[in-house]
């Protein structure tokens, strides 16, 4: 797989405020959780051509990239004459209805404005803001009493909205505490009502700027700026304001950038912008909050420690040249931000303020705002609010002179590492000159496309045939650690089998043979143009992203790309320059590579330890035989070659004419004894894409633990067999996944509808013609770590036999109920063909009896039950407590956490009882708005519909029903329900999975702190623990099966109305 991009790993902090629905759950239980330009020369059917002014290549191939320009006076006059005029220099997809404008404020802050007035529901913002139907319980916004300055009313949009009812008072304990007590809303939305407004701000400063004596200071500042401002001093006021109006926020710190973002209902966007901007104008950074935020950072650090990816980054960073910021400890923890500063008499509060004044300057900042207002309105708001951010006039921090940080003897060696996960893995990495400046050519993208290919002639195909490898990922992750102003990393990671581990040097040699083949051939224009075409197709018809994700991505793009490429720079190949690609290829030579071999078999052989995460490792020179061979002109491997032309690339983008009446929700268009198919033609997003979902239901799966293991093995082998023939479809943006569900095989597919039927037939053909080798089973068992579930683990240890697997697969395919959903740019006739093809190829007969797709649950006794077991991994210090709220804790005893949950619920009950009707209605109104939020892309609607089909509830307008229920909900309804749930007849179950550590009374603290007992320390059976004095009044469960056998079963639970 080519790793084009992934979420940042390095010390990413999320002080996320998400959305939670405490009222409607799908089970009758209380659930609480802590824890290019177009490369085509002819018009594209179904989509307009790029206008001449929109064409990214208008300057000509090879033209130098231009830096963002301030607009001229003439451009400004023309723009003001037409409020909807976007910036013609910014290239966008012709199917993107949004308008864009780029400007630079006098204080140096750069801003990209995005007007989403031409939204998919067709209601422009200025009209929707006036006279919009508002539920009578909704409460409007006025100035806050803590503001210290009045917000100027925007007469263009909201002068008729202020009825004076929705006064947000940060001193009102009902408002604030109720906000704090609500948690995370599931991302369930109803289509066609409202899209949230969003903003993101990127500061060109990150952990590279950490002082040597305060590792993690940039991360701590990211936390601290949100602790109130001079204008809005309440410490939690902004989060409470967002929650009240259906919003969320987040922030992250990377090596050279820190990003902040939020979203909120459009009506409250201007006030939210003002509140948010104050964190960059005059944050309070309350001294008393420092210790609390340091504890939050330390918790993030503890959660990050058991990640092999994080550990590898920190280990690689330690190999950099002395003085390079890569050697710093970016995460920060209690030691670096609390204990050590105290010992050294460092006033961390003063250092925080100094850091903010030095680095949080307007000319370091890029802002992106997206809302349904006009561009002129957004410009007015941004100028009014963000011009107040100070500019200190200091030069931006620059690390570009610190080149080649990995050009050291320590880097060019073999490192053996003990991983957390039970895997064998070989990682090969090179340090390269920074490649961001070549974003129009994307040499790393081109190389990763080839190295990570899984089709014929690829590295992985060859290794799989030798049963040496299970997966391969190649490329650059585009995180701050892997790509910054001083270097870029290109890495190849191979997941090995046991046999592959024994031959890891041979595996590395095969990688080097493939790279040498690429070096001798040079860059291939056909391959580059194929990659370009796939990217252009996707860009032309891209899904509209969630606004908060979109603005977050763009605010970082502005730091990297020239103005015309803000939207295209991270997606499209814009210039073919073979000399740039060849230069990078020639740098990927064996003698300049770093090799890291991860394996649990290294345990006991690695006597070095990385300081911060405790990673155990050893270091040695590359074996002389291999180093001598790689220094020579070694032979190429004739089985390794470039991929053939991709037959799955879509070329027909015509929107199909409907052949079935338009419907708001999916309808069942075909029903047979073997199954049914649901269908909905896309009438909203109007793109040449589709989604196909099928559920092949069989009662055979849940007959025994053995059946579950055989089923998962079957699905994994099919996926394994599909990897090579289906890879071309995957890279052509046709996505698929086979999932071993609890009651059947789930097939999920999406992409351009033109070639999607080809992929569907390929998958069904592989199911029909299932073949495997005995060795496949062994390899796939090694690949999937979920076999540690106790019953499956025991079954697996008894052995899997080919005859058992063959018999299971034959039985599975012989009797099925097949249920499907086809949604998007297909006709109803084509949709019926999908079901018919499944039935025809699998030759399945009807089930004798319907197979339920739910588990029945036992009727618990009226008491508080406790099931307390020891964790299976001795290297995991985290404990998990579930009372339908989950917490992950490394510092507290699991029963103390349970006690705190109980205390919280009692406190919550009291708060609800004394809650004012006004505060209650505010919460209900915010939840209604969240459920009425429009879908950003077709997939959101499909996921919601598919969930109804998977659960066989078919309530496709569920959100509408929930909104109606919310409108009739009273405070007394909620209080009565909560009290009944927790009264004398309550049925409560506490599950404690107890980690290994001092807090749980374990004496082997060394093993815990090292976090290394991952393989030899795994436990193959549950160890039940007695309750301590904290929970002496509970009924303890010591044998799960015997306990549940004594209880009655409740009927299947479905919410159908």
Image (cartoon, rainbow, N blue to C red):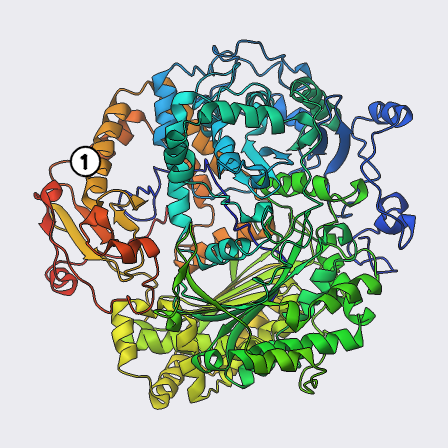
Write the residue at 35% across / 90% down.
803
Q: Position of residue 766 (x, y in %)?
A: 53, 81
Disc 1: CA contacts within 10 A as few (<14), some (14-19) or many (>=20): few
Q: Is residue 46 above or below residue 695?
A: above
Q: Name the foreground residue: 342 vs 249.
A: 342
Secondary structure at badge 1 equals helix
Say which quarter of the image contains residue 775: bottom left
Q: How many marks?
A: 1
Q: Is residue 508 above or below residue 606?
A: below
Q: Residue furthest bottom?
A: 803
Write the residue at 8% across / 43% down.
1033
Q: Which residue is mark 1?
A: 980
Q: Is residue 814 left or right of residue 651?
A: left
Q: Is residue 754 visible?
A: no
Say which quarter of the image contains residue 698: bottom left
Q: Is residue 78 left or right of residue 669?
A: right
Q: Name the foreground residue: 740 vs 573.
A: 573
Q: Position of residue 295 (x, y in %)?
A: 37, 35
Write the residue at 50% across / 26% down.
351
Q: Name the foreground residue: 1052 vs 670.
A: 1052
Q: Position of residue 926 (x, y in %)?
A: 45, 29
């Amino acid at each position: 797989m080519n790793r084009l991009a992934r979420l940042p790993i390095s010390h990413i902090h999320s002080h996320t405020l998400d959305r939670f629905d405490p009222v409607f759950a799908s089970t009758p239980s209380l659930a609480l959780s802590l824890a290019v330009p177009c490369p085509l020369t002819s018009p594209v059917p179904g989509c307009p051509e790029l206008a001449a002014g929109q064409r990214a290549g208008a300057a000509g191939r090879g033209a130098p990239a231009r830096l963002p320009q301030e607009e001229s006076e003439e451009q400004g006059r023309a723009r003001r004459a037409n409020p909807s005029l976007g910036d013609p220099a910014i290239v966008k997809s012709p199917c993107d209805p949004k308008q864009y404008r780029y400007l630079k404020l006098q204080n140096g802050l750069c801003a990209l404005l995005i007007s989403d007035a031409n939204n998919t529901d067709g209601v422009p913002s200025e009209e929707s803001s006036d006279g919009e139907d508002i539920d009578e319980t909704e409460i409007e916004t006025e100035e806050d009493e803590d503001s210290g300055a009045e917000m100027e009313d925007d007469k263009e949009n909201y002068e008729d909205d202020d009825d004076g009812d929705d006064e947000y008072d940060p001193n009102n304990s009902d408002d604030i505490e109720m906000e704090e007590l609500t948690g995370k809303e599931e991302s369930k939305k109803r289509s066609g009502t409202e899209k949230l407004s969003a903003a993101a701000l990127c500061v060109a400063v990150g952990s590279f700027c950490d002082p040597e004596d305060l590792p993690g200071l940039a991360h701590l500042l990211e936390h601290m700026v949100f602790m109130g401002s001079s204008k809005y001093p309440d410490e939690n006021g902004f989060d409470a304001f967002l929650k009240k109006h259906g919003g969320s926020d987040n922030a992250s710190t990377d090596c050279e950038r820190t990003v902040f973002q939020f979203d909120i209902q459009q009506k409250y966007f201007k006030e939210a912008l003002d509140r948010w901007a104050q964190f960059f104008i005059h944050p309070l950074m309350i001294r008393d909050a420092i210790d609390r935020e340091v504890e939050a950072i330390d918790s993030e650090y503890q959660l990050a420690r058991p990640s092999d990816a994080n550990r590898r980054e920190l280990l690689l960073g330690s190999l950099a040249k002395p003085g390079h910021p890569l050697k710093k400890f970016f995460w920060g923890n209690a030691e670096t931000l609390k204990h050590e500063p105290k010992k050294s008499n460092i006033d961390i509060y003063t250092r925080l303020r100094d850091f903010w004044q030095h680095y949080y300057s307007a000319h370091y900042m890029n802002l992106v705002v997206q809302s349904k207002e006009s561009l002129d309105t957004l410009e007015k708001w941004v100028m009014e609010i963000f011009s107040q951010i100070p500019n200190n006039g200091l030069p931006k921090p620059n690390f570009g002179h610190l080149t080649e940080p990995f050009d050291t003897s320590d880097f060019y060696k073999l490192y053996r590492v003990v991983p957390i996960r039970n895997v064998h893995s070989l990682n090969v990495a090179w340090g390269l000159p920074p490649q961001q400046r070549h974003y129009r050519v994307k040499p790393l993208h081109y190389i990763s496309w080839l190295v990570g290919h899984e089709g014929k002639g690829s590295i992985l195909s060859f290794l799989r045939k030798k049963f040496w490898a299970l997966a391969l990922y190649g490329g650059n992750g585009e995180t701050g650690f892997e790509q910054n102003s001083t270097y870029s990393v290109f890495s190849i990671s191979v997941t090995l089998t046991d046999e592959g581990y024994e031959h890891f040097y041979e595996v590395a040699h095969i990688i080097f043979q493939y790279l040498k083949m690429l070096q001798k051939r040079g860059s291939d224009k056909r391959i580059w143009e194929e990659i370009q075409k796939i990217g252009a197709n996707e860009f032309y018809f891209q899904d509209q992203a969630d606004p908060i994700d979109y603005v977050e991505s763009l605010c970082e793009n502005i730091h990297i790309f020239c103005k015309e490429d803000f939207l295209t720079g991270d997606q499209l190949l814009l210039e073919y320059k073979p000399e740039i690609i060849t230069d990078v290829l020639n740098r990927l030579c064996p003698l300049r590579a770093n090799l890291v071999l991860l394996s649990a078999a290294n345990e006991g052989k690695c006597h070095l330890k990385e300081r911060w995460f405790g990673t155990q490792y050893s270091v040695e020179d590359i074996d002389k035989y291999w180093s001598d061979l790689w220094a020579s002109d070694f032979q190429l491997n004739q089985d390794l070659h470039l991929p053939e032309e991709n037959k799955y690339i879509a070329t027909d983008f015509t929107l199909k004419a409907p052949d079935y009446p338009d419907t708001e929700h999916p309808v069942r268009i075909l029903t047979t004894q073997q199954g049914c198919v649901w269908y909905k033609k896309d009438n909203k997003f109007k793109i040449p894409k589709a989604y196909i979902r099928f559920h092949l239901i069989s009662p055979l799966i849940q007959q025994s633990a053995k059946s579950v293991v055989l089923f998962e093995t079957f699905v994994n082998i099919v996926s394994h067999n599909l990897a090579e023939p289906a890879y071309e479809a995957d890279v052509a943006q046709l996505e698929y996944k086979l999932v071993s569900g609890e009651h059947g095989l789930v097939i999920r597919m999406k992409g351009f509808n033109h070639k999607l039927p080809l992929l569907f037939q390929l998958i069904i053909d592989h199911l029909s013609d299932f073949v495997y080798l005995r060795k496949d089973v062994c390899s796939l068992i090694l690949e999937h770590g979920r076999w540690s579930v106790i019953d499956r683990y025991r079954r697996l240890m008894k052995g899997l036999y080919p005859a058992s697997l063959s018999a299971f697969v034959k039985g599975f395919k012989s009797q099925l109920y097949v249920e499907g959903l086809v949604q998007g740019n297909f006709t109803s006739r084509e949709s019926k063909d999908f079901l018919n093809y499944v039935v025809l190829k699998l030759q399945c007969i009807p089930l004798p009896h319907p197979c339920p797709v739910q588990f029945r649950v036992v009727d618990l006794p009226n008491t508080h039950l406790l099931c307390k077991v020891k964790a299976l991994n001795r290297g995991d210090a985290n404990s998990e407590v579930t009372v339908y709220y989950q917490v992950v804790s490394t510092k507290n005893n699991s029963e103390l956490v349970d006690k705190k949950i109980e205390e919280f619920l009692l406190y919550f009950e009291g708060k609800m009882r004394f809650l004012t009707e006004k505060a209650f209605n505010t919460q209900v109104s915010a939840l209604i708005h969240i459920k009425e939020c429009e879908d950003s892309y077709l997939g959101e609607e499909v996921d919601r519909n598919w969930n109804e089909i998977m659960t066989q509830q078919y309530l496709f307008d569920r959100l509408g029903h929930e909104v109606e229920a919310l409108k009739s909900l009273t405070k007394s309804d909620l209080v009565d329900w909560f009290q009944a749930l927790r009264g004398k007849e309550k049925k409560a179950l506490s599950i404690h999975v107890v980690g290994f550590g001092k807090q749980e009374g374990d004496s082997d603290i060394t093993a815990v702190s090292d976090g290394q007992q991952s393989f030899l320390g795994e436990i193959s059976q549950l160890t039940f623990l007695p309750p301590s004095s904290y929970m002496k009044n509970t009924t303890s469960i010591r044998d799960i099966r015997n306990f549940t056998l004594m209880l009655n079963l409740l009927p299947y639970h479905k919410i159908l109305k």
